[in-house]
Image (spheres, rainbow, N blue to C red):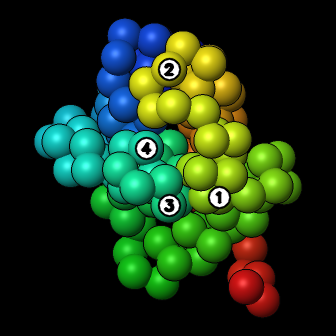
Amino acid sequence: MKTLALDYYKNWYSCSESIVKAASDKGYCSVDLVKLATPFSGGMSVGCICGALAGAQIVIGSIFEKEDAKLMSKELIKRFISYNKATCCKILSHGLDKGSAERRELCKNYVANTAEILEEMIKNKIYVQSNY
């Protein structure tokens, strides 16, 4: 899934769209969700939560029942933070201009990392009840 997500991102899908499209290609969710992921790009277009992370949340919500989805969502965020230290697009992108080559280069790491975490969690239905 990581390779698929990176390929979509390199071909100008957004961060959130790349995650959802890759998950769709793997059969984890409907391709119709890619359109739903669009507004979550670039931290919901204002730099809030990382779009790759938001896309992963969409996938989780489409697969799992409410309580499992909540637990998996928390675990996804916990794992993302352990690798990246933040979830906010503005912080992660270090103030680089949206759409700049530097920012796209940086953000491809978040797309790859998120895709890897998400697929591992889906395959193993991993979630840990945390005190978030």
Q: CA distance from mark 2 to mark 3?
A: 18 Å
Residue sitting at the far bottom: 131
Residue 11: x, y in percent? 37, 10
Name the residue carrying label 3: 48
Mark before the other along the chain sequence, 3 or 1: 3
Q: CA distance from mark 1 to mark 2?
A: 20 Å
Identify which residue, 8 or 127, lies in the foreground: 8
Quarter residue 57 falls in: bottom left
Q: Nearer the viewer, mark 2 or mark 4?
A: 2
Residue lying at 56% horizontally and 68% vertically, measured from the top left: 73
Name the residue carrying label 2: 100
Q: CA distance from mark 2 to mark 4?
A: 12 Å
Mark before the other along the chain sequence, 2 or 3: 3
Secondary element at tag 3: loop
Identify which residue, 7 or 96, lies in the foreground: 96
Q: Are marks 2 and 3 in contact (CB under 8 Å)?
A: no
Q: CA distance from mark 3 to mark 1?
A: 8 Å
Q: Are marks 1 and 2 in contact (CB under 8 Å)?
A: no
Name the residue carrying label 1: 87
Mark before the other along the chain sequence, 4 or 3: 4
Residue 10 sits above or below residue 57 on the image: above
Residue 42: mark in rendering: 4
Residue 129 sits above or below residue 72 on the image: below
Amino acid type of the residue tagged 2 in the rendering: Ser
Mark before the other along the chain sequence, 2 or 4: 4
Quarter residue 41 falls in: top left
Amino acid type of the residue tagged 3 in the rendering: Cys
